Each structure stands twice: as structure tokens, then as C-alpha cells.
Image (spheres, helix red, strand yellow):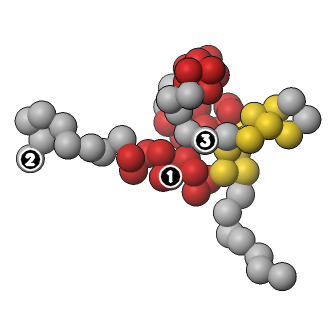
């Protein structure tokens, strides 16, 4: 059995990591624009690797970026 170092975060933990409001993460989830998540017992959970992948994807070609 392979053991992964990946782990699950709660919505407040993701909000704290990104330094934004919990309701912003909830809004993103409804809009499908934030990090991927799964629901366990009706509660959203975010895999750390998915949060990091989403963060990295935010660095696209931006006007004026060096």
C-alpha cells in the first residue's frame, strides 16, 4: 500500500492559507472557479496538492508581468 504525504484541508484552512474570507472560498466552490474539492458527509474538503496546483495555475501570462 502506497502512503501519500497529501492531506485534506477544511474550507477555513484553505481560506486562512490564501488569506481570504471563508465565504469567498464557498462562492468559488459554487461558481466552480476555485480549487477542486470533494464532499465528505456534506462537508467540503480540499486536497493540499489540488490547492497548490490551483495556486500555481493562477500565475498565467499577465499583462505587464516581467
Q: Tell me the SS state at disc 2.
A: loop
| Numbered label tally | 3
- Residue at image position (66%, 51%) is 47
Tell me the crowding category of disc 1: few under 14, some 14 to 19, or many 20 or more residues within 10 angstroms, Cα based.
few
Label ID, residue 52: 1
Q: Position of residue 43 (x, y in %)?
A: 82, 32
**What distance separates the C-alpha of mark 2 from that of mark 1?**
22 Å
Badges 3 and 1: C-beta atoms under 8 Å apart?
no
Crowding at dot 2, Cα within 10 Å, few <14 / some 14-19 / many 20+, comes out as: few
Q: Is residue 25 visible?
A: no
What x and y, as percent, mark residue 53? 48, 52
Could you tell which of marks 3 and 2 lies nearer the N-terminus?
Answer: 3
| Nearer mark to the viewer, of 3 and 1 | 3
Quick one: label 2 or label 1, which is nearer the N terminus?
A: 1
Which image quarter: residue 27?
top right
State the residue lying farthest toward the bottom.
1
Task: Please give the residue where the numbered disc 3 appears in the rendered image.
Answer: 36
Q: Is residue 6 rendered to the left or right of residue 57?
A: right
Please report the residue visible at 68 percent of the width from the left and 69 percent of the height from the top: 5
Q: Which mark is residue 66?
A: 2
Tell me the CA gap for discs 3 and 2: 29 Å
Amino acid at each position: 500500500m502506497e502512503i501519500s504525504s497529501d492531506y485534506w484541508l477544511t474550507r477555513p484552512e484553505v481560506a486562512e492559507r490564501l488569506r481570504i474570507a471563508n465565504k469567498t472560498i464557498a462562492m468559488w466552490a459554487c461558481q466552480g472557479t476555485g480549487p477542486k474539492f470533494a464532499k465528505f458527509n456534506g462537508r467540503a474538503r480540499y486536497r493540499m496538492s489540488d490547492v497548490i496546483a490551483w495556486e500555481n495555475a493562477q500565475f498565467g501570462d499577465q499583462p505587464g508581468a516581467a
